[in-house]
Amino acid sequence: MQKLKNLVFYGIGALFLMADAFYNSYPILYSDVTTYIANGFDLQTPFDRPITYCLFLRLFSLNGLSLWTVIFAQSFLVSGLIFRVAKILFGDGLNKFVVLAVLLFLSLFTSLSWTASQPISDIFTPILLLTTIILFLGKPNKKEAWLLFFVFLLATAMHLSHISYNLVFLTVVVLVRSIRFFRLREVIRLRTILILFGLTLIALSTMLSALAKSRHVFFMGAMNEHGILKTFLDDNCETTNYQLCAYKDSLPKRAFEFVWDADGPVNKMGGWKATEEEFNAIIFQTLTIPKYIGMHVQASLAATYEQLLKFKINDGNTPFPDGSLVYERMRTYFPGELEQFKQSKQNRDALSFTKNLNYFYSIIVLISIAGIVFWLFVLKMGQRRKYILLTVLVILGIVVNAWGSATFSNAIDRFGAKMIWLLPLLAVYGLWLYWLSKKEQVALSHLFDLSVARPPERSA
């Protein structure tokens, strides 16, 4: 009975997290949805990403019945994980209605609902982080642990970037654990870390084909945006006949333009397969020559910093009119929802209000950072230790995501928006802990006053 009640709470939380989709009158779409839809139904592995989310979309759309059920499924998963993180801090006496209030706050005042309301794989990066945190700090029983390991494997397999994300995140945890930071060695078991490394390698084995076909293009796009490619070509084009030399003075500024534009270098050189040998040769040289290694390090740090400041919603969620690829895929695979899709606010270009909303979200993030710092100092020691561990892991996850996105692809708002809501979550949980501690102090003070009060004197 208790498990059923939990599922009901998770479901209500999931509906809260779908607020932006409800406001839009349809799930919010991004151009990548075309790949997920087509490859999920055609059962073909995409050349630039694993097939995992494609299959997830097909399964939870009930084989093309609705995209609403897709975003409900992923929102349900996020809702359940947020409840479980709360249990780490507040124990079995957790007030589930308060967690629902937290979910409503996150949905209305952070980027979480926007991310959860999109049928693309972005939401699985925070799912991956929250699952890891629960495995580390939540002391799950055997049955729950196996379920969490499965979710970790599933989330890892959703995106190519999750492999490097896991490897860096887990390696840093091992290093921090080795210096006995806040007795982390006693909390996080080495066995759990090794299992997560193993699951990451298993997930890697499912996406080797996509990695082999795409990594040289994405990384070269990043090198182009960081200015490394232009410097390399200026240094070497007089002595080496690279095809890219023909475009060295007309390279696009942004990585996505280099990779995707029809008149960009990749397409002009014959596409992803045709560029593989030359791109890999250039990449290898820049990773083995000291001059370019220094440029990579400097560019990575600068791009990571840039990515940490980028977290606006409505990044690339433009209207998709008749004739666009998104429209054609909706007409082919979701004909029953074509009218909903056409009448959504997104497709009527009625989401311009998000520009002002993004300023508000930025203020929420700044207040959250200040709040987190404050709670770290004022919470009681027992509460503070758990809160510090949770904060360290969340911030590490956000930074590693920013590093991976900016270093190997490019710094864009969508990559930041999918993670930044974790800071307001930390701040609200800290406020809740502080309120409970104050409430407990008042109760103890009242009890002490009663215990030392003198009985009234009797009349003579």
Image (cartoon, rainbow, N blue to C red):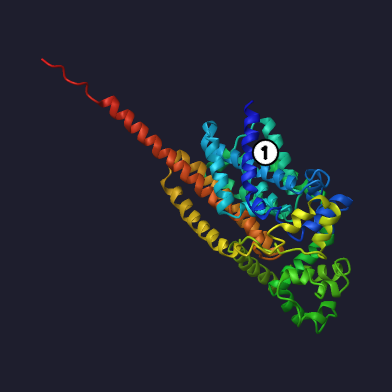
Q: Badge 1, how many Cα within 10 Å: few under 14, some, many 20+?
A: few
User: According to the image, label 1 marks what residue?
Assistant: 191
Task: Judge by depth and name the residue closer to the eye, 449 or 459.
Answer: 459
Which residue occupies the extreme left position in the image?
A: 460
Query: What is the quadrant of residue 38 in the picture?
Result: bottom right
Position of the C terminus by quadrant: top left
Task: Judge by depth and name the residue closer to the eye, 289 or 121.
Answer: 121
Residue at point 42%, 48% (across, down): 377
Residue 85, visible in the rendered structure: yes
Residue 160, visible in the rendered structure: no
Query: What is the quadrant of residue 379 in the picture?
Result: top left
Indicate whether 173 appears above or below 295. above
Task: Judge by depth and name the residue closer to the eye, 369 or 107.
Answer: 107
Q: Position of residue 126 (x, y in %)?
A: 65, 50
Which residue occupies the extreme bottom position in the image?
A: 238
Q: Position of residue 19 (x, y in %)?
A: 63, 50
Position of the N terminus by quadrant: top right
Q: Position of residue 444 (x, y in %)?
A: 36, 31
Q: Position of residue 221 (x, y in %)?
A: 75, 69
Indicate whether 30 appears above or below 1. below
The answer to whether residue 449 is left or right of residue 65 is left
The answer to whether residue 256 is left or right of residue 273 is left
Describe the element under mark 1 as helix, strand or loop.
helix
Residue at point 50%, 59% (across, down): 366
* Kind of residue at badge 1: Arg
